[in-house]
Amino acid sequence: MTSDSQRWRALFFISIAQLMVVLDSAVMNIALPSAQQALHFSDGSRQWVVTAYGLAFGALLLVGGRIGDMVGRKRVFLWALAGFAIVSAIGGLAVNAPMLLIARAFQGVFAALLAPAALSLISLSFTRPRERAKAFGVFSAVSVAGGAVGLIAGGLLTEYLSWRFSMFVLVPIAVVGILGAIPTVHDTGERHRARLDVPGVLLATVGLVAVVHGFSSAESDGWTGALTIASFVAGVLLLAAFIAAQARVRSPLLPLRVLTERNRAAAYLSVTLAAVGLFGMFLLLSYYFQQVKGWSPVQAGLAFMPLAVAQIVGATQVGARLAHRLSPRPIMVGGYLVTAVGLVLLTRLDGGSGFLEIAVAETVVGLGVGAAFMPAMSVATHGVAPQDAGVASALISSSQQVGGSIGTALLNTVATSSAAAYLVSHGGATVAGSQVHGFSLAYWLATGVVLAAALATAVMVNARSPRHTPAADDAPELVAAH
């Protein structure tokens, strides 16, 4: 058993590793135009620099969680950090598009190993209610702010150094994580000794790849395109077969008992829905800053600072503090409702909007999502058997990744098609004006999806009186009691 001070040091290094994972998801969004110009790949293939990472990450998270349960979370955590550092260096040294795409895909593979290992190590190390709330507050702040921080870092590195440093910067972060984790991080959970469910791995992996690929291909082939429809149909059938198989095999990749507890199921669903709106919002704001406002990569990156700071405050100062007094349900519902208000404010932005107006909208969104995601992450992993900790952790990360992939494709498609239709129907409209119109409609859609997350939470999560919240002495029974 580690000392209190050592566990908090361990949390610091685990959070550094998590920052690396979520930062990598966003940093290439700003660096991508420069990388495309340097490596001479086409407009049609440039999306795969982002999609290759997301496909590998989202599809392999369940496998990564189960491997951590089998061979040890700390061991997998260190292996994944080392692998991430190596492939990031290879990506920074890429001499052509295939080399960069392969590196990005392997980053996704190692991220799928790293993310559930990190979350389960925290869940197993911090079991006392008050310190658990604080630990998840720190971890949530890193998780929800990492995307915005990645956009800021991508802008600075691309403009003042090179797009390659958007990959190279991950190497020292990984090294610091390894050196710090070796003496401080300890795996206190039991190991799952059964064999890996290989058929389940194949069904889940290929099924998730097909679903995410369907939403990605919808951007270029359209929602009724043959490849899009085929991907959706194949993905749904494979995932249905996976769920049916998990109920019958002796050692399932995803024990259905993890999903059947209503609080955890609500957390997974609400995070997926929220990610649909929020990941697409990041992409559209980046386009708005650079194409409508005409800002440089650095200016566009720094414009996300109010959002990043508000997310940290929302997780550590709002969500974590309220967790001492309230049950998860009102915190999550309130956070999602505040997020929806911020998205409505974004619908009102136009080409003449000043930075103050933008910052206010970002701040409201950031406070809401930061407050909501903190208890959601805790609920998603609370009360699971130690041998299932990795799978439960993988599911919450997979909810974010898959929801984000869906949202990016969905909101971008809505924004692009609406802008094109507006330009045709309004003869005097400018390109920037039509883009703003498309962004506004997409933000309204995002608002609706986040409101659906609030509704799902209100209906599914059990209400608890303040004295029986995660801050209460009997909080470890919160999930098991239901």
Image (cartoon, rainbow, N blue to C red):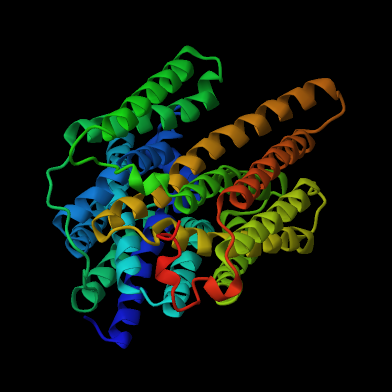
Q: Nearer the viewer, residue 298 or 347?
A: 347
Q: Quadrant of residue 103?
A: top left
Q: Quadrant of residue 244?
A: top left
Q: Nearer the viewer, residue 143 or 428?
A: 143
Q: Residue 10, relative to residue 91: is it above or below?
A: below
Residue sitting at x 52%, y 49%: 266
Residue 8 image offset from top left, x and y in percent: 35, 81
Residue 363 image offset from top left, x and y in percent: 68, 64
Residue 415 image offset from top left, x and y in percent: 67, 33
Q: Residue 463, relative to residue 290: is it above or below?
A: below
Q: Residue 358, relative to residue 173: is it above or below?
A: above
How many labels, in total?
A: 0
Q: Is residue 328 visible?
A: yes
Of the 4 image quadrants, the one containing the N terminus is bottom left
Q: Is residue 43 visible?
A: no
Q: Residue 141, relative to residue 337: is it above or below?
A: below
Position of 62 with respect to 299 (left or right) is left
